[in-house]
Amino acid sequence: MIPFVIMFKAPYSKDFAYHFIEGDCYNHGAWIYDRIAKNLTPIDIAFIGSSHTIHAIQDKMIEQLLDSNDHLVNLGYCRSGRNFEYILLKMLLEHKKPKLIVIEVYEDEVKNSHDIFPYLADTKDLLLTPTLINRDYFSDIYNGAVARLEYFKAKYIFSVKVAEPTTELYGYGATDRTATEEELAKNIAAWEKRLARFEPESIEKIKIKYPFAYLAKMIRMIKENNIQMLFIYLPEYGSKLKEPKYAEYYQNAGSLLIPPQFIFDDPTNWMDATHLNDKGSKLISSWIAKQIKMELCVDEGIK
């Protein structure tokens, strides 16, 4: 146990951590760290979410449409998990001073840990789970220990150097691919089965405490820093859910943006069954730019 305890008490480099996961999600982890912690360009408006955000939010385009001095960035990362978004938000607020944060919401909340969380989390966030119900707790501890062992080896044995920081300012994932009819049909069928499954309300109330615990922390941090907050609904093709399951929760915390349904209904707007392509994201981004303009004008008017 002694080496184990030492690993978790010793300093752990975020620079190493975010570059350690470089083989995942288009190397987006390393780019996110460089953009937030190393790049001196401000971040005034940040989008936080999953790969739905990566492929839906054309940050450079929205920035241009806003026609202001605000710097906008898409910080989406593959797969969903509120605990990952929480530690990302912590790092963002440590290094930058955004005035607006837009958080992606899905049809339903993901009720487990993000698989990248243990590699990036501080020891405190890794060890102190916010709820007793956390099915991934021990696997997260194990993976966190593996990451810290790799850091020890990289620093003291192999002297591995971290790659030079990237200078790219925007995180949108461009693609002109169009989903096939077969892909879309399969996802429609998958959603029909998913929505037909029954789970007792008592079980749902227990499971939802996990993502809501992290979401509550994020909301509190944003409000404490006097930052404006929006939620945006980015569903999959074929779910047929016009709004998220927990829409009321998001609306009570901040404004919930629900893009026009015709964008999601058009099969030519999709890269695959879960991600928009350039055509679809252009429509979404144009619409979002108008919403942000209105929100910022209202906020400035109040002040």
Image (spheres, rainbow, N blue to C red):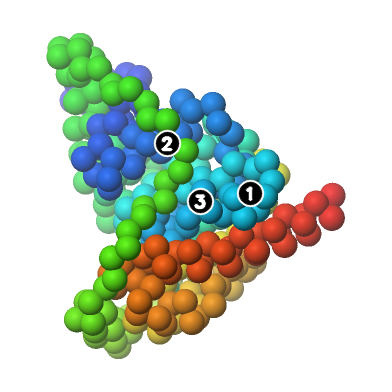
- Residue 186 in view here: no
What residue lies at 65% left-to-right and 64% top-to-bottom? 291
What residue lies at 56% left-to-right and 45% top-to-bottom? 72
Horizontal arrangement in the rendering, residue 300 relative to residue 188 (left or right): right
Figure quadrant of residue 249 = bottom right
Whole-number angstrom distance, CA of label 1 to CA of label 2: 21 Å
Report the disc number at residue 100.
Answer: 1
Vertical position of residue 136 compared to residue 246: above or below = above
User: Residue 221's spot in the image, x, y percent?
Assistant: 60, 44
Under circle 2, the secondary element is: loop
Closest to the observer, 140 or 236: 236
Marks 3/1 in contact by CB < 8 Å: the verdict is: no
* Residue type for callout 1: Leu
Under circle 3, the secondary element is: helix
Which mark is first along the chain, 1 or 3? 3
- Residue 286 in view here: yes
What residue lies at 72% left-to-right and 62% top-to-bottom? 294
Closest to the observer, 80 or 203: 80
User: Residue 218's spot in the image, x, y percent?
Assistant: 54, 49
Q: Residue furthest left?
A: 158
Marks 1/2 in contact by CB < 8 Å: the verdict is: no
Residue marked by disc 3: 59
Residue marked by disc 2: 168
